[in-house]
Image (cartoon, rainbow, N blue to C red):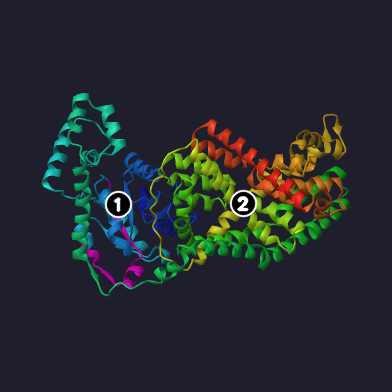
């Protein structure tokens, strides 16, 4: 029987931690290239020799001090769960900074193996690292690896197994004054049956760790707490940090040789242009416009037409003929052809556009450019009271608002985090792209990319205005400083891009096969029946519901029950808006193509107002759920739903009314 082993992966953002996780477990988790990509621990299983190894990918952190949600998640797991071994991933090309976390990990009562990653990059920069001597100095196993190329993985796993068998406790010796304080605090707290290692606890108290001190005061008597408080001062905190950095410096002096002078790298030369004070934003806008050109004109629409022809002509016609030949009843034929194929197929035709968008954004993220966007946006974000770090989850929102809202955990300031959660749904997710693709293709066939691009820009502008209002009223206060590591530019790995695009497409397809499939069947029934039984569509239960809410949308230019019912169902998932429209118009007149029906019921300006409303109104049910989870408040969740609907109504109404005057 194989032995069980729990291994945690800990390291700085951009150290290659998640790449190593994928290499070890074969997990399909997205491999990003900027801070904040992993906001929760991820688990995977690895079988190696006599061991079943459970691997946990912890959030990327720079230290174990509880200053951000990510650091708290990582530290709590290490302390509460006590994994058998911690693999500390260290970027060999930025070894001095990375080793600060290593020092903190070595102070915990947990075996540590250091995976010295990106050795190829370090060698290119002229660093020669004596791995054996480094291991000796640190008192723990150090294994050189290149995670992106699967180099050194077996040696790393051997080290993990051996470290579990014979762990060593090595820790930094601080100056005499600090060591004396550590010993005295240990003597005071040694009677406590704590989950913490005593030395580590004493150091954290001297570092004035808020969480530890609060927990300490709850456990110990008042006079003991007062005695401990007398040890707390800024000098001790500074001395501990200095002690770690001095130790690191001394270790590296003996273990690293620089063979060539540092030259201006290709990354630096590219950044001179892409992060330029005046050129940065225009270049970002141009790149994003190029993404939409690629998504629609260059590739997406060509593939869309092929799939559309296959589903709505070849497949639907063939299935219909087959069902008639089989003698299937008319209502079942309608359910399958109009309900299922019309609904689910109406969404699947947009798969090429969705895939192209995911592909383009994945390339930008994996290349390292998106981290620069956050840096570029910092100045603009500060004008509305947020830091550039808040723009990172906003960028994630272009893919899906669910992980984007979860990504706000990387924000240190709670007010900034709440504001970012409240404005994030204004960032246009990929599901909304199905609506834009259909409407822009029908009503603006020669300017499709410009129309869709304008919607994404509008979403950002509305988010910015909302954030400014929030920071001036409800969430007053200064934003936390913004510090971000800009990773080197790299050529995105084909494997990583494929995994990322497939993961997102898989979610889209699962929605099509579950939510949209179910919603299509339900809608077919509510459009074919009322409380008295079978009914024509204009007198169906669905039509009655649509007619009740339709007047709300009349000032917006689409006060028709069909549009109203489609928008109502879009709260389940935004893709459902299009699938339901396909079903409604298909049942009403099967001889007409959806595009013809829409042209008869919308004008150009009402179509644009409809897209604006879809952009801004109440997010899907999954996003609502994660907003509740992340805010832990029904008050903010309900507020989010109401204010987003109101904003969507007002903006769409303004667009339509002004558009009528101009046009």
Report how far apart the C-alphas of labels 2 and 1 lie in the structure.
Answer: 41 Å
- On the image, the x and y values in percent for residue 8 come to 36, 49
- On the image, the x and y values in percent for residue 647 come to 63, 41
Q: Nearer the viewer, residue 264 or 255?
A: 264
Whether 111 is among the magenta residues is yes
- Residue 330, picture quadrant: top right
Residue 325 appears anywhere in the view: yes
The residue at 82%/29% (across/down) is 531
What segment carries the magenta color?
A: 110-133
The residue at 75%/48% (across/down) is 343
As displayed, is residue 466 above or below residue 118?
Answer: above
Whether 344 is among the magenta residues is no
As displayed, is residue 185 above or below residue 366?
Answer: above
Q: Nearer the viewer, residue 171 or 305?
A: 305
Write down the residue under mark 2. 458
The label shown at residue 101 is: 1
Q: Nearer the viewer, residue 619 or 415?
A: 415
The residue at 26%/58% (across/down) is 141
The residue at 71%/43% (across/down) is 653
- On the image, the x and y values in percent for residue 302 come to 71, 66
Badge 1 crowding class, 10 Å Cα cut-off, few under 14, some 14 to 19, many 20 or more, is: many
């Amino acid at each position: 029987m194989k032995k069980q082993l729990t291994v945690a992966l800990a390291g700085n953002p951009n150290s290659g931690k998640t790449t190593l996780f994928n290499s070890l477990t074969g997990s399909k988790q997205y491999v990003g290239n900027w801070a904040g990509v992993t906001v929760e621990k991820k688990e995977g299983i690895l079988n190696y020799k006599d061991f079943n190894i459970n691997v946990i990918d912890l959030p990327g952190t720079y230290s174990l001090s509880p200053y951000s949600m990510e650091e708290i998640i990582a530290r709590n797991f290490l302390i509460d769960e006590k994994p058998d071994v911690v693999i500390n991933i260290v970027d060999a090309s930025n070894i001095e900074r990375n080793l600060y976390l290593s020092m903190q990990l070595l102070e915990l009562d947990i075996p540590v193996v250091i995976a010295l990653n990106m050795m190829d990059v370090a060698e290119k920069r002229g660093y020669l690292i004596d791995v054996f001597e480094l291991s000796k100095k640190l008192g723990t196993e150090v294994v050189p690896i290149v995670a992106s190329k699967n180099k050194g993985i077996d040696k790393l796993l051997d080290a993990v197994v051996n470290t579990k068998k014979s762990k060593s406790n090595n820790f930094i010796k601080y100056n005499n004054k600090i060591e004396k304080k550590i010993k005295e605090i240990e003597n005071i707290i040694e009677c406590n049956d704590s989950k913490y290692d005593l030395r580590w606890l004493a150091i954290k108290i001297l570092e004035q760790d808020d969480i530890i001190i609060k927990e300490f005061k709850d456990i110990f008597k008042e006079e003991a707490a007062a005695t401990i408080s007398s040890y707390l001062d800024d000098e001790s905190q500074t001395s501990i940090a200095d002690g770690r950095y001095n130790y690191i410096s001394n270790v590296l002096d003996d273990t690293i040789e620089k063979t060539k002078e540092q030259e201006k790298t290709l990354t630096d030369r590219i950044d001179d242009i892409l992060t330029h004070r005046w050129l940065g934003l225009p270049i970002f806008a141009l790149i994003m416009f190029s993404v939409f050109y690629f998504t629609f004109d260059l590739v997406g629409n060509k593939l869309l037409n092929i799939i559309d022809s296959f589903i709505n002509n070849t497949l639907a016609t063939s299935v219909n003929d087959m069902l008639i030949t089989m003698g299937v009843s008319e209502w079942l034929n309608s359910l399958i052809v109009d309900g299922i194929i019309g609904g689910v197929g109406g969404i699947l035709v947009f798969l090429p556009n969705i895939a192209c968008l995911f592909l383009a954004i994945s390339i930008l993220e994996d290349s390292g450019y998106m981290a620069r966007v956050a840096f570029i946006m910092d100045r603009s974000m500060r004008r509305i009271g947020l830091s550039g770090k808040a723009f990172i989850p906003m960028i994630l929102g272009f893919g899906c608002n669910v992980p984007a809202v979860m990504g706000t955990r990387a924000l240190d300031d709670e007010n900034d985090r709440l504001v970012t959660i409240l404005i994030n749904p204004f960032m246009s997710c990929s599901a909304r792209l199905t609506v834009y693709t259909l409407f822009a293709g029908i009503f603006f066939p020669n300017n499709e990319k410009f129309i869709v691009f304008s919607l994404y820009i509008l979403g950002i502008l509305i988010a910015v205005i909302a954030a400014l209002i929030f920071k001036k009223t409800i969430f007053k206060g200064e934003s936390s400083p913004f510090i971000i590591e800009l990773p080197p530019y790299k050529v995105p790995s084909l494997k990583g891009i494929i995994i990322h695009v497939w993961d997102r497409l898989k979610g889209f397809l699962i929605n099509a096969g579950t939510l949209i499939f179910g919603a299509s069947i339900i809608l077919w029934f509510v459009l074919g029946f009322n409380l008295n039984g079978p009914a024509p569509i204009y007198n169906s239960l669905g039509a009655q519901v649509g007619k009740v809410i339709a007047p709300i949308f009349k000032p917006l230019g689409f006060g028709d029950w069909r549009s109203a019912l489609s928008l109502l169902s879009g709260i389940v998932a935004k893709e459902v808006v299009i699938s339901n429209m396909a079903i409604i118009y298909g049942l009403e007149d099967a001889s007409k193509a959806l595009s013809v029906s829409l042209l008869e019921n919308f004008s150009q300006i009402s179509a644009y107002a409809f897209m604006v409303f879809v952009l801004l109104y109440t997010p899907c049910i999954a996003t609502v759920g994660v907003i509740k989870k992340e805010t832990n408040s029904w008050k903010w969740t309900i507020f989010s739903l109401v204010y987003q609907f109101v904003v969507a109504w007002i903006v769409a109404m303004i667009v339509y009314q002004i558009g009528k005057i101009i046009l």
